[in-house]
Image (cartoon, rainbow, N blue to C red):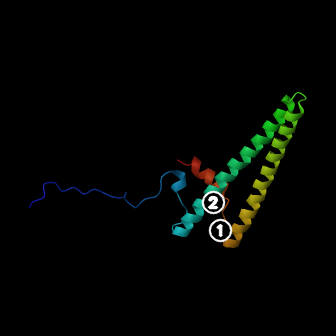
């Protein structure tokens, strides 16, 4: 039986897969290096998101105090929201130090390299 059509279809790009976008780019060429890079990027992004969220909650609580108009229930709810926001910010900052400590103990020096992650976002 004779082949009618012979076409070579590449299954991978030349040089292999490099990842798609800044989250796919890794500095480590080994699997543990790629894993630690991914974990550090995920932790960095979640830390920034949590810090922004709790700061936003604190500001909204302050606005609610101003808008309470003397209502004791609204004032108490706003105080609780500010307390929750401040506790959240303290927990996020403490978590940064704890994760950094764990990264140092495990030998992952750049586990919270947020600046490096933002640098990869701005590169073409």
In the rendered image, residue 27, in percent from the top left (x then y), is placed at: 55, 62
Q: The residue tagged with tag 1: helix, strand or loop?
A: loop
The answer to whether marks 1 and 2 mark residues whose Cβ atoms lie closer than 8 Å is: yes
In the rendered structure, the answer to whether residue 16 lies left or right of residue 95 reads: left
Residue drawn 59% across the image and 62% down it: 37
Residue with the most extreme left position: 1
When the figure is inspected, residue 53 is found, relative to residue 103, above or below; the finding is above
The N terminus sits in image quarter: bottom left
Residue drawn 84% across the image and 43% down it: 80
In the rendered image, residue 89, in percent from the top left (x then y), is placed at: 78, 50
Q: Nearer the viewer, residue 82 or 76?
A: 76
In the rendered image, residue 118, in percent from the top left (x then y), is placed at: 63, 50
In the rendered image, residue 68, in percent from the top left (x then y), is placed at: 86, 30
In the rendered structure, the answer to whether residue 87 lies left or right of residue 15 reads: right
Q: Which residue is mark 1?
A: 108
Quarter holding residue 65: top right
The alpha-carbon separation of the residues under discs 1 and 2 comes to 9 Å
Residue drawn 56% across the image and 49% down it: 123
Q: The residue tagged with tag 2: helix, strand or loop?
A: helix
In the rendered structure, the answer to whether residue 120 lies left or right of residue 15 reads: right
Q: Residues within 10 Å of mark 2 (few under 14, many from 20)?
A: many
Q: Which residue is mark 2?
A: 40
């Amino acid at each position: 039986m004779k082949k009618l059509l012979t076409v070579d279809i590449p299954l991978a790009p030349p040089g292999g897969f490099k990842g798609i976008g800044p989250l796919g780019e890794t500095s480590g060429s080994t699997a543990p290096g790629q894993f630690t890079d991914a974990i550090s990027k995920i932790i960095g992004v979640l830390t920034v998101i949590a810090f922004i969220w709790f700061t936003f909650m604190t500001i909204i609580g302050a606005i609610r105090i101003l808008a309470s108009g003397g209502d004791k229930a609204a004032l108490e709810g706003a105080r609780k929201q500010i307390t929750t926001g401040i506790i959240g910010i303290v927990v996020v900052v403490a978590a940064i130090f704890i994760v950094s400590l764990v990264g140092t103990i495990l030998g992952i020096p750049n586990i919270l390299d947020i600046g490096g992650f933002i640098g990869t976002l701005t590169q073409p």
